[in-house]
Image (cartoon, rainbow, N blue to C red):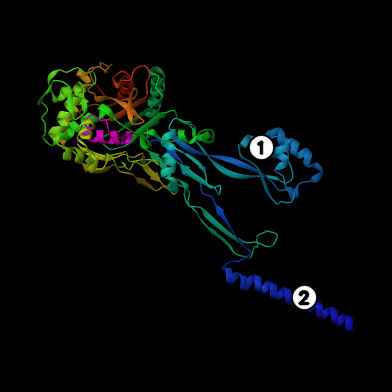
Amino acid sequence: MKKLQLVFAVFSLSLFFVVIRLFYIQVIAAEKHGTNLYLQTQRIIPARGEIYDRTGEPLVLNQTRFQLFAEPKKMEKESLSDDLSKLDEILKLGESTLEAKFDMNKQWVAIQSDLDEEIKKKIEDLKLVGIGFDEMGRRFYPESSLSAHLLGFVGKTDSGDDIGYFGIEGFYDRDLAGLPGIVKSERDVLGKPILLGTQDKLKGENGRTLTLTIDKNVTRIAKQKLMAGIERYGAKSGCITIANPMTGEILTISCLPDFDPDKYGEFSEEYFRNPVISDSFEPGSIFKPIVMGAALNEKAVKIDDKYNEAGPIQLGKYYIRTWDDKYLGQISMSEILQKSSNVGMVYVGSKLGDKKLLSYFKKFGLGEKTGIDLQGEVGGVLRPDKDWREIDYATATFGQGIAMTRIQILTAFSALINGGTLMQPHTVKKMTTADGKSEEIPPLPVRQVISAKTSRLIKQMLMETVKHGEAKWKVPKGYKIGGKTGTAQIPIEGHYDPSKTIASYIGFAPVDNPKFIALVTLTEPTSSPWGSETAAPLFFEVARELLVYYNIAPQ
């Protein structure tokens, strides 16, 4: 009897401690930590938004991919070696590599991700116990590297989440990523749902779909011509940027060398940098129309004024010469642009005045970011007002001694020819939510820089520059096209290397109502250092294609 009472007492005491322990776990500990220890939370990853060009052609899509996993404790040890051999015949990982992934003490192990439907079907046909798949999304770029610098790519964070890097994927990462959903469910000690417990689901939101200002057909034209041009002129690299100067809409940014966003892991980081928004350069003579436009706007000079181009200009210990060291005597303001006269531009700058010159640089947005919706933009280099010397003012009038990005010069030049308004460049035309609500992104005027009258005058001068310039190009018959060449030496270790240049051409058409503006730059062309002999012919090849594509009739 005493033994029975002792057993009962021990049993009662044990039961008491179990009850106390359960009370502590379920009530006291839960209140202390603010959590239910049996409540598990799981994120629902939303679908990333897709990206289309302005015509509805896909640029970035999502593909369904699968992650292969194993539950070792459910697998049959006797057939494990045979099962691994069968898997390896499909996966081609090597049996030793595959075996190393299995830890029989774990509930779950990942084997391989990014498998397509065909591989999944082959493995499922094996009917292996303890082998399963999780569905996962993968970013897919149908045109591969066609718009790589524009689009960027999707990589992984340290925690394994998707994140956009560079370009549109980086800038619009939050919009594209969406909002994850959450599932909260109470589970027992074996991990199985408690049917009468808490089962809450917070719905997430898939990422927004982006419709770009980019035109895939224009991009294809630019890239094909650029590829051929780099090879023909022996250039180290090159870029073609095309925009609508009236709205600031970017139609394409195409740079070579580039990368494949589907295989970004195979490229070093230097390939991801977009030269159009991330690299500064001295623009050279393509900058001259901007200074001329400022002087005309201030009435510092008139279009029919004359300048006596008698010889080099001496400023202290420096001499400024024309590009060919030839001097033509009396020349008009239009002829200064046509002949790309450095000394003529120094004269124009002196008539405008140093303070006005700097004020217009700032009005045109030089030295600051344009605000383009691409990740990685830098602001260029414009020295503080107090650091400008006489020689700096002089060389800046013909685009040397100052540095800016390609998108800055394109944006400033657009203001010259669109009636005088500086427009913020942009690449996204519309955002659409998962439930179909669309938000249009309108053009954004920044400020009026020059008058509409000045804009008409400078367009006329740039058309005359194409007609009467030093170099003769294959200008499409019957079309009015304006533009300007540029050749800028590359500063290396404090001095200029005359053999290393950035050759450029910026042009637009038609002159009366520009439908497009294009900037072509070639870095270190070896066939000729001059923009007139490399970048300019390449521009006119592109322009001919665009005139046909946009169905622009001869004037």
Q: What is the three-letter code of the residue carrying label 1? A: Lys
Can the viewer see residue 555 in this picture?
Answer: no
Q: Which residue is mark 1?
A: 121
On screen, residue 311 versus residue 145, left or right, reads: left
Residue 256 appears in which quarter of the rendering? top left
In which quarter of the view is residue 486 placed?
A: top left
Instruction: Judge whether 255 appears above or below 198 on screen.
Output: above
Cα separation between marks 2 and 1 = 53 Å
For residue 147, the mark is none
Q: Please tell me which residue lies in front, 116 or 30.
A: 30
Q: Which residue: 16% across, 20% down?
A: 311
- Quarter occupied by the C terminus: top left
Crowding near pointer 1: few (<14 within 10 Å), some, many (20+)? few
- The residue pinned by badge 2 equals 14
- Identified by mark 2, the residue type is Ser
Part of the protein shown in magenta: 396-419
Q: Which numbered mark, 2 or 1, is in the foreground of this view?
A: 2
Which residue is more in the foreground, 496 or 182? Answer: 496
